[in-house]
Amino acid sequence: MDWINLLTPLAASAVIAAIPLMLAALGELVTEKSGVLNLGVEGTMLMGAIGAFAVTVQTGSLWLGVLAGIAAGVVMSAIFAWLTLSLMANQVATGLALTIFGIGLSAYVGRPYTDATIPMLRDLPIPGLSSIPVLGPSIFSLNPLGYLSVALLVAIAWFLYRSRAGLVLRSIGEAPSVAHAIGYPVVRIRYLATLFGGAMSGLAGAYYSVGYLRLWQENLTAGRGWIALALVVFATWRPGRTALGALLFGVVMALQFQAQAMGIRIPSQALASLPYLATIVVLVIISRNRQTIRLNAPASLGKPFFAGS
Amino acid sequence: MRRKVLITMASLAAAMLVSACGKQENTTANAPAAASDAQASAAPAGKGPMGVAFVYIGNPGDAGWTYAHEQGAKAVEAKFGDKVTVTRVENVPEGADSERVFRDLASKGNKLVFGTSFGYMDSMVKTAADFPDVTFEHATGFKSAPNLGTYDVRTYEGAHLAGVVGGHVTKSNVIGYVASVPIPEVIRNIDAFTIAAREANPKVKVKVVWINSWFDPGKERQAAESLVGQGADVLMQNVDSAVVMQVAEEKKIHAFGWDSDMSKFGPNAHLASAAIDWSKYYIRTVDEVMQGTWKNTPVWGGIKEDEIKLVAINDKAVPEAARKAVTARHDAIRDGKYDPFTGPIKGQDGKEIVPAGKTLNDDEKHQINWFVEGVEGSLPKQ
């Protein structure tokens, strides 16, 4: 069989599957860099997905829908931020509660929208580049949300490692009391980082419901929020590696179906377990080098901050 | 401060419980919903309306498995009016959780309880033993009791009719099949589909991709796209969501709907939908329990009983020859003159599995774990 005809759909399918994982993981990365651990990504994604879908159905506008998805994500993370940053509730427990809350509430809100139809977000191929074999159709022929995701990746990487504000954000994740002593508003910055993470999860959900599947069903994301959370650790809190990790997941997810469609006789259950096996293998490899984790993991991750402590 | 946190956490937890647990909906034909509990509990005492309950794995929505059952529940309401009180409990998870729901429904005076998902089986067996006066009916199960019957539908007959159309329509001779979980029911559908497709066009190959999940629209989409990438110009499915239809519409190829009419998700792509219709069965069963004539007899209805049909055939996409062939095959199955699982049937490796002249009986059909010739794809070894 022709390799190009084989790899092209694989790459395209992998990139599209990777985008929502990457968006949610990048948002969580920024949140965690400020020292806040928000385990509510799955619930937030679902609220973003139904928010975007419902508003698209009601208004007929995909872009209003996407904005509503982002807004739903911000509201979810605002609840989380208020509970954990203002009221000092336990971050792990609150995050888990937020996910269960989001699963239930999105199912309830989404009831009238089950199997409504919405228009498709058109792909915008970049002339010339999109005809490059294999990579062209996958990277240079995305829908607008796909391009936005790539732009966000670059912007977040630049912000964290090249801007002064990013430096402040990271320092708050490492040593909040020191940052506080110099006069930075620790809680306010953590609020902003958490809201940004929620916005990204909401966008990831919106991408999934209106940009990719074009439908709503209960529990639509089917656990992808958890994969995004794992990706942050998998990527040792680096934006570039987060994108690569998401892509790796996308490739393995796409590969299991491609291999079956090609008639490769590997049990489909074994193929289905590949992404998780890959995660464990990479985690083991990363953990062998403790320094990579120690250097990048925010030192005060998940610890509440009391001014004056 | 600490107390405030606790209160907020508790209210968040309460909110999530409210929304995560199954929503119970009581509806009566002409009494306000609030009164239905009282009515239902009064039912066993004498002449009041008979309590009939449906337990759903999901919510009805506009399409799919639960939707098909809900149409049956509505038919019961329409037929019996104020002689019945119909209760639905939606989003009931399989396993131990469901037992609480079944016990609750039985103790509230319902005389007949339908459980509509395979995983309710053991909960229903246990509940039925404790409520001998209540009749239970379990969809797709294989365990029964004196007051617990089973019912199922011959979805493979619908898949077979779809196969007739698929064989006529495909030009690439590759049909993609998005399959859920490798159990005999799904394998049987794939086989019956392939037998018909290859009868219409012996060059047809049916490529099967398993998503190994009952529900994951993301995987369904990737599976469908992979099949299109491998040359499929017609997609068949054994999953509930409309994603496969949407992919076909986007790629300008064709697809079949499953469980209910899915034509609105792909007006051009849609060839036909294999739709389940439980209404006759539900009406008959309610009537039997009401008259006291109900006996535990396993029900496996198909085309003959009008429980599965090929609906919404797309005139623009399906040639007349195919429509005629479908009608002929439908009538032959209805009249008992044809059965898709009649030999000679060759297996995937070309060796004969069912000899000429032999037809698989229901027990054998229930245990199918092999692919027929023409299917490309693998089955997990048992």
Image: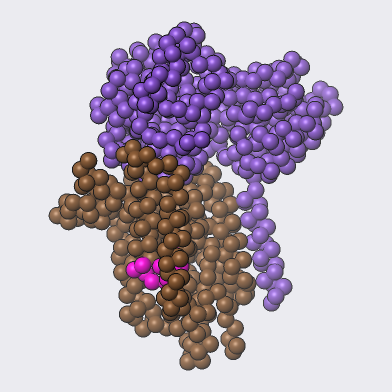
> Which chain is depicted purple?
B
Residue B217 location, x and y as percent? 44, 44
Q: Quadrant of the N terminus of chain A?
A: top left
- A164 drawn magenta: no
- Residue B260 appears left or right of B83: left
Q: Which stretch is magenta?
A: A231-241
Q: Tell me, yes or no, if residue A86 can be seen here.
A: yes
Tell me where residue B65 appears, x and y as whole percent: 53, 33
Point out the residue furthest to the right here. B45
**Is residue B380 toward the left or the right of residue B75 in the image?**
left
> Residue visible at 46% across and 58% down?
A227
Give me the residue at 72% from left, 17% from top: B295
- Note whether A77 is above or below B186 in the view shown: below
Residue extending furthest toward the front? B351
Q: Which residue is pictured at 50% across the width and 85% down the height?
A: A175
Chain that the image shows in brown: A
Residue at x 39%, y 79% (from the top left corner): A166
Image quarter in which the C terminus of chain A is found:
bottom right
Eyeballing the image, is B35 above or below A19? above
Q: Chief secondary structure of the magenta span?
A: helix
